[in-house]
Structures are given as C-alpha cells and as structure tokens.
Amino acid sequence: MGYLPWLSNKIVTRITDGRRDPGGGADGQKFDDGKSALRANRKIYLTFDDGPGAGTLRAIEALAAVGGAASFFFLGSELDALPGAPELFERLADGGHTTGLHGYAHLNAWKHSPREIAADQERGLDALKRFDSVRWARPPYGRLTPSLVRWYKSHKLTIAFWDINPIDYDSKKSGRTRSEIIEFILESVRPGSIVLLHENSAVWCDGIQDLAHNLVSDGWELAALPVVSGTAGVSGHLAEAEAEVISLFR
Ligand SMILES: [Zn+2]
C-alpha cells in the first residue's frame, strides 16, 4: 500500500485546473453561470500514443484546421526510424503541441524486469530529449510498477494517464466502428478530460479530422498538456488528479 497515496497525487488522469467541475456535460447546457466560467472549463486534452509517424502529421493538420493542439507520447524506436524528425518537431512547436515519453520499444513493464524497463525508458528519453524538453510520460499499455514509478520520479516526469479510453487500438475488444469511437468520445468528455488515442490506429486514423471538428463544434477547446518551464514534476495547477486511477492497482 505504501506507494498508492503517492501515485494518487502524481498520476494525472484529468486536468481540472484547480477549479471545481461545475457539473456541465459535453453539451455545456449546465454551464449557466456566465461565459467566462464556461470558457475556463472547456479545455480537453487529446493525447496520441505510439508515434511519431504519418499519423502525427495527419493529427497536426487536422488540429491546425480547427485551431487546436494536442500531446504526443512518442516511442524512441519510431523516432530513430523517422527521417525529418527535426522538421516534425518544428511543426509540433509551431502548432503549440507538446510531447511526452512512451519508452523506446513499447515494453510492457509487467512482463520485463525493472532493469530492462529502466534501460528501455532511458533509451527512449535520450532519443526524445534531442528534440524536446520532456516533462510528461506514459508507460506502454498503461502498465506501471513501483520501480517504474520511481524511475519516472527520479527523472522528474509527470505520469499522464487518461479518463477517456475509446479503445481505438482494438476494434474487436471495443466493438466500435470509427464513427462510434468518435461518438463515444463526444459523449464522454468532461472539462479537463484526457483522451487516450493511438495515432497509428487502423480503425480510425483518418477520423481525426471528424473528431477534432465535432469536438470544437461542441464548444471544446483542444489543448496540449501544459509544459511549465523550469518546473519539474506535477506543478501546482496539475496537483489535482482524479482518484479513479487507484482502481488500476486493486
Ligand atoms: Zn503505446
């Protein structure tokens, strides 16, 4: 039990920006206390795992078309295989996007030794930090162990989970078509939601335009996970993480 209280404070599944959730849903109907409150609570965070690749560019273009931004959790192996990585990171920066670490070879921390996992993360971090400052991390498969949590902590990385998972990586498991995935997200997002997506998902990678357009039409602001320069780990306004993440460890 010793590490659970620490985890509950350090894993971010939703960013509430320190404000209380006024109780509004995706339709925004319950935000009846003025426009500023509505606007302040309309940020949501799309996150894309497993790139970079062709999907990164598609996402950048789709988000640019609606004035939105997102966050990308990159694999060192994909990064090393990508020609033109410097140009990609320029485009990411221009669009206000942020990146995070997803390891090197997508190893499952529950199936490899702590030493293998640490080496893999280290290698991924070395690849990513050639291009970007790294503040965020997300373990492959969402699998954490106490030693991986310690590794993230020692590298001053904030762990980003999610509160919305449309299971876009496995159409059999989710039973959802592309339009059903989009529908699910539109119906599920709340203020500050972090949405788990995979940019190479065969199910719907071309659907990013539809998703971005529909979310913005519903009044959501598509934002990148914030990177606060000079601040390591969870900064003040990110300190509130939802407790549902604890259920992962029961
Ligand atoms: Zn992944």
Image: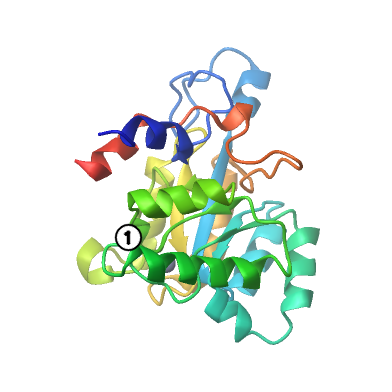
Colour convention:
rainbow
The residue nearer to you, when weighing 25 against 200, is 200
Is residue 114 visible in the rendered image? The answer is yes
Residue toward you, 17 or 160 = 160
Does residue 231 lie above or below 179 as drawn?
Answer: above
Q: Quadrant of the image for the C terminus?
A: top left
Instruction: From the top left corner, tell me how far across and down residue 130 is, in percent.
Output: 73, 70
Q: Quadrant of the N terminus?
A: top left
- Looking at the image, residue 55 sits to the left or right of residue 68; the answer is left
Q: Residues within 10 Å of mark 1 (few under 14, many from 20)?
A: some
User: What residue is disc 1 on?
Assistant: 167
Check disc 1 and give the amino acid type. Answer: Ile
Q: Position of residue 128 (x, y in %)?
A: 65, 68
Quadrant of the image where one finds ligand 1: bottom left
User: Tag 1's secondary structure?
Assistant: loop
- Say above or below: 40 vs 217: above
Task: Please state the horizontal and vertical placement of residue 187, each as a whole percent of the image.
Answer: 38, 43
Task: Work out whether residue 53 can be spotted.
Answer: no
- Number of on-image labels: 1
